[in-house]
Image (cartoon, helix red, strand yellow):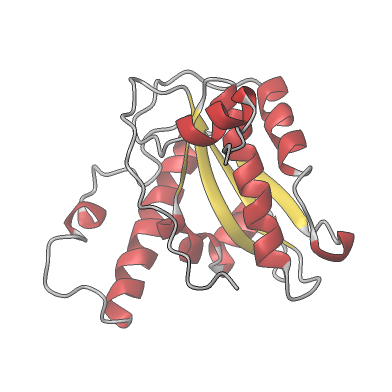
């Protein structure tokens, strides 16, 4: 049996995409961000709802304030859910020097309007499109899941202009990587059933 090949352009983006956590201070221009957002909205969407909206943050001072508040929310959430089992996993989140956004020049928050049960899935599909497009353009990305609770707090929503009924779903940092990020391995697909 001949194994089908994924076309080179698609395979390169899928296999080369990495979580980048070290960025140059170079700010992305508006045209680049619009290109990424145009790729994001080409994602599949249930019942053609297109529930996504976007917040783009490039102000360094605002990113620092958001980082500091998001770290507080994340540490509180971990303690509340008893997920910190006495290890040192949260130590860096408690450090005032740690930037949850890894000093990236741009944070794009994909938000979802309350349009049905598939909003979160649709937003994550848009996130993957955005990340693959960024990778193909030589940019780095990283999902910052630890920022979600903070971004959904009433005070952060107010500061960012996110309406109360809209939820921050996928915070993604984007920027120019400061160095090569090594590939990580993946496990083989675990097939539970093939009937």
The answer to whether residue 50 is above or below residue 113 is above
Left of 54 or right of it: where is 132? left
Estimate the x, y position of residue 28 in percent, counting from the top left: 58, 22
Residue occupying image coordinates x 26% and y 76%:
83
Residue 115 in which image quadrant: bottom right
At x 73% / y 36%, what residue is drawn?
39
Q: Position of residue 76 (x, y in %)?
A: 32, 72
Res. 136 visible in picture: yes
Q: Residue at x 47, y 65 (%)?
A: 191
Q: Nearer the viewer, residue 120 or 79?
A: 120
Is 170 left or right of 89, judged from the image as shown? right
Image quadrant for the N terminus?
Answer: top right
Q: Nearer the viewer, residue 158 or 16?
A: 16
Residue at 26 percent across and 55 percent down: it is 93
Give the residue furthest to the front: 1
| Number of marks in the rendered image | 0
Q: Position of residue 164 (x, y in %)?
A: 69, 69
Question: Which quadrant would residue 189 be assigned to in this image?
Answer: bottom left
**The C terminus lies in which quarter of the figure?**
bottom right
Which residue is farthest right?
A: 48
Query: Residue 134, image x and y in percent?
Result: 58, 29
Q: Is residue 166 visible?
A: no
């Amino acid at each position: 049996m001949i194994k089908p090949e994924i076309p080179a352009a698609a395979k390169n983006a899928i296999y080369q995409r990495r979580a980048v956590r070290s960025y140059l201070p170079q700010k992305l221009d508006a045209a680049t961000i619009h290109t990424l957002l145009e790729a994001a909205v080409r994602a599949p969407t249930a019942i053609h709802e297109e529930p996504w909206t976007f917040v783009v943050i490039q102000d360094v001072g605002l990113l620092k304030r958001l980082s500091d508040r998001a770290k507080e929310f994340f540490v509180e959430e971990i303690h509340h859910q008893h997920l910190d089992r006495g290890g040192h996993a949260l130590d860096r989140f408690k450090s005032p020097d740690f930037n949850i956004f890894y000093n990236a020049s741009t944070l794009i928050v994909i938000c979802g309007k309350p349009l049905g049960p598939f909003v979160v899935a649709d937003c994550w599909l848009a996130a993957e499109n955005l990340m693959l497009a960024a990778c193909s353009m030589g940019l780095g990305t990283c999902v910052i899941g630890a920022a979600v609770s903070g971004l959904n707090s009433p005070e952060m929503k107010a500061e960012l202009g996110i309406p109360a009924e809209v939820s921050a779903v996928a915070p993604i940092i984007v920027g120019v990587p400061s160095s090569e990020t090594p590939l990580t391995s993946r496990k083989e697909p675990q097939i539970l059933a093939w009937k």
